[in-house]
Amino acid sequence: MKALVPVKRVIDYNVKPRVKSDGSGVDLSNVKMSMNPFDEIAVEEAVRLKEAGAVSEIVAVSVGPAKAQETLRTALAMGADSAVLVETDETVEPLAVAKILKAVAAEIEPGLIILGKQAIDDDSNQTGQMLAALMDLPQGTFASKVLVEGDYVKVTREVDGGLETVKLSIPAIITTDLRLNEPRYASLPNIMKAKKKPLETKTPADYGVDIAPRLKTLNVSEPPVRQAGVKVADVDELVARLKAMGVA
Ligand code: AMP
């Protein structure tokens, strides 16, 4: 069976985001961009499933600007077999991404679609769930363990109360949590090989998807600066201060 792995190009997780002075969004000029960390985990899981013989082919897909090709090349260097870039310079909201992924999946017919649980730029945590609804497929979100058994996949999920295991019939949708695996680094020979792997470019219009935004960002602002702490001499002073603040 094939695995489809959507990967998003996002601001690198080591970069401290700067808010644009007009409050319209995050300033992305001259900022390092990388593959969304949860998507690296998704690629890694697909590669491990391929190594274990459960998956025969891995297709990576990204919706984004031409530069997202670099992100797809990283996925190819990690072990994906081919890639599709659905190119657009517009901001694409999770619902539009999910619609595009549905159309891509209709062509590729994957047994598993493995997404990240969330993109660290918008923190939506919506795309996988929306895709499952649009495609009417079972979903195992926040996966910390994935086990393919014949026509089923067992997904252990991180939920508030601990771990829950669900058994999904394939085709199915999985979203990855942090503890699923530790992604490999692409080796230099694999980076070189990845340059020769097929990368197809399409547009949202090729899939008949209207990506016009449905949400309006009113304002983006920095979080309030944290107040300095105070050292107290003893418990009595602590209680007195808390009482004065009205919390005790
Ligand atoms: P989100 O719902 O935006 O938090 O994203 C959840 C997951 O959906 C990500 O980890 C990716 O696997 C996938 N995804 C979201 N946006 C894109 C995109 N533009 N291109 C490819 N995959 C995406």
Image (cartoon, rainbow, N blue to C red):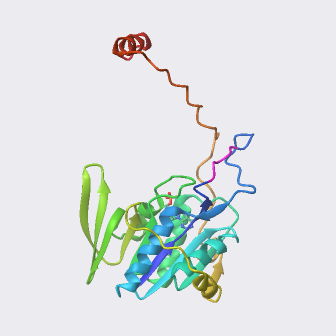
The image position of residue 170, as x and y in percent, is 32, 78
- Residue at horizontal 64 percent and vertical 48 percent from the top: 17
Q: Is residue 18 magenta?
A: yes
Q: Nearer the viewer, residue 84 or 229?
A: 229
| The magenta segment | 15-19
Q: Nearer the viewer, residue 217 or 8?
A: 8
Relative to 75, 55 lies left or right: left
Q: Is residue 51 visible?
A: yes
245 relative to 189, above or below: above
57 relative to 40, above or below: below
Q: Quadrant of residue 241?
A: top left
Count of labels in the image: 0
Relative to 119, 243 lies left or right: left
The image position of residue 155, as x and y in percent, is 29, 68
Q: Nearer the viewer, residue 49 or 108?
A: 49
Q: Is residue 43 magenta?
A: no
Q: Is residue 1 visible?
A: no
- Residue at horizontal 45 percent and vertical 70 percent from the top: 42
Q: Nearer the viewer, residue 241 or 141?
A: 241
The image position of residue 217, as x and y in percent, is 63, 45
- Residue at horizontal 38 percent and vertical 80 percent from the top: 49
Q: Quadrant of residue 32?
A: bottom right
Relative to 235, 199 lies left or right: right
Viewport quadrant of the N terminus: bottom left
The image position of residue 140, as x and y in percent, is 33, 65
- Residue at horizontal 37 percent and vertical 15 percent from the top: 234
Look at the magenta stretch and give its main secondary structure: loop
Viewport quadrant of the C terminus: top left
